[in-house]
Image: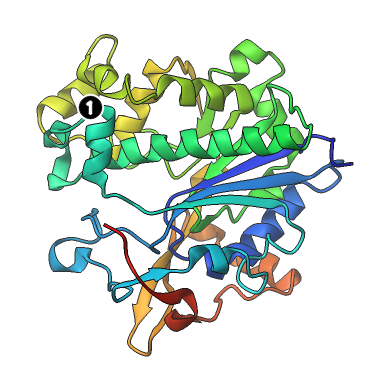
Amino acid sequence: DVRTPPALLVYLTGHLRTFLHISPLMRALLDEQAQGQACGYAVYMHTWDTLDHGDEVWYRKGAGAQSPKESSRRLNVVAALSNPALNAFWAERQFVARVDSHPGSAAFGKLYGTTGLNSWCGQRLKCVDHSVVQFYELRVVHALARKHLASRGVAPGANVPVLKMRPDIILPVAHKRWDVRQMRHILGSNTSRASATIAGYIGAWRKGFGDIAFLTSLSGLSRMADAMQSSRMGVLLRSDAGLLPELRQAKALGNYHAEEVFDELLRKAGFSTFLVSPTLDTYAKARLGYFPNGTVGISAWELRQEFNWAEVHAFFRAAGLPSAPAPIALSLLLVAAPLSA
C-alpha cells in the first residue's frame, strides 16, 4: 500500500565516495533490519556531483588532499544513481535523491555566518565549514523526504526512526543487534523524549559525538533541521552559553574538531539524551581510491571495531555478495561537460 508509512527512514548525506560499490551490501543489511515490517524502509539521499571533496582532512593533507580530478568533466551522478547495476536501491524504487553542484565549503561559511570560525579547529582543518555543510545537507534531505512522502499521501508518525549515514559506510553487526523494533525501543514511545534523543557513538576527540552515523526520530530530525537555519548557525556557535567546559577549552586552544562542533550544535538544538549504540560504534567505512588504470574503487576498509570483520564476511557470503566489490571504470561515471563555477 503506497499510503502505508515506511517503518524506517534512511537518510544518506555527503559525497558518494564508494556508495556505488557498497550499495548492495548496504541494502542487504537494511533488508535484514526491516524484515517483517509492513512497508519496510525508504532511502533519501542528498549528494554532490563529484565523488569526493578536495579539502584537507585528518588522513589526507597537503598535495594529497586534492583527489584526482574527474578531469574537467562533470560526474554523471544522476545517471549513475538511476542505474540499477550501480545502485542496488534503484531496482524497487525505494530511493529518492537530490544531486547538487558543490559551491565550496567557504560558500557555506558565508551562508551560515560562520566565516572565520575555522580558527578554532585543530590541525588547521575546516571543522566548522564541514559541520555547517553537513547540517545544510540534513535540512535538504529532510525536506526532500517530507515532500516525497506528502506527495504519496503518506504521513509517518513523529516517532518513526531515522537512520542517518554517510553513503560510504555500512553497519556490519546491524543484522545481529538491531531491527526496526529495537530502534523504536531505543528512542522510546514518548514523543517529547524521542525528539530530544540521539543514539550514536563517541568520537575520537574528548567530547565529540560521532557524526558519520546516528539514529534519532523523525521529530528529532525536525528539531535538528529547524535549529540549524542559516540565520542561526553562526549565532549558536559564537555563544559559549551552556557550552561544556571541555568544548570551551578545545575551542580556546584551537583544537576543535568536527565531532565536537556536531556535539555542541546538537545540545544547542535541544538534544538532551545521548545514547552510545554498540551497533553504530561498529561502522565500516569503504575508503575511495583512484587507480592508475582509470578505475575507482575501495582502497581500504576502515573498521571502527576490527573484531567484527569476520562476521560481516560471513553475512555477505550467506547473502551471496562480495565484500570486495570490483572497481568501476571512471569513464562510465563521466560526461564531457565542464564543471560549473
The image shows residue 108, relative to residue 191, as above or below, that is below
Q: Where is residue 188 in the image (x, y as percent from the top left)?
A: 68, 20
Q: Position of residue 251 (x, y in %)?
A: 16, 27
Label 1 environment density (alpha carbons within 10 Å; few <14, some 14–19, many ≥20): some
Q: Position of residue 279 (x, y in %)?
A: 58, 44
In the figure, residue 170 lies in which quadrant? bottom right
Say which amino acid is labelled 1. Answer: Gly
Q: On the rendered structure, is 26 left or right of 3?
A: left
Residue in the foreground of this view, choosing between 151 and 53: 151
In the figure, residue 155 lies in which quadrant? top right
Name the residue at 47% across, 21% down: 226
> Of all residues shown, which one is farthest toward the bottom?
293
The image shows residue 304, relative to residue 179, as above or below, that is below
Q: On the rendered structure, is 7 left or right of 60?
A: right
Q: On the rendered structure, is 159 left or right of 49?
A: right
The image shows residue 162, relative to residue 303, as above or below, that is above
Q: What element carries label 1?
A: loop
Q: Quadrant of the C terminus?
A: bottom left
Q: Return the residue at label 1.
A: 113
User: Is residue 3 visible from the viewing direction of this image?
Assistant: yes
User: Is residue 277 visible from the viewing direction of this image?
Assistant: no
Name the residue at 67% across, 65% down: 88
Q: Where is residue 100 in the image (x, y as percent from the top left)?
A: 43, 51
> Of all residues shown, which one is farthest toward the right?
1
Q: Quadrant of the N terminus?
A: top right
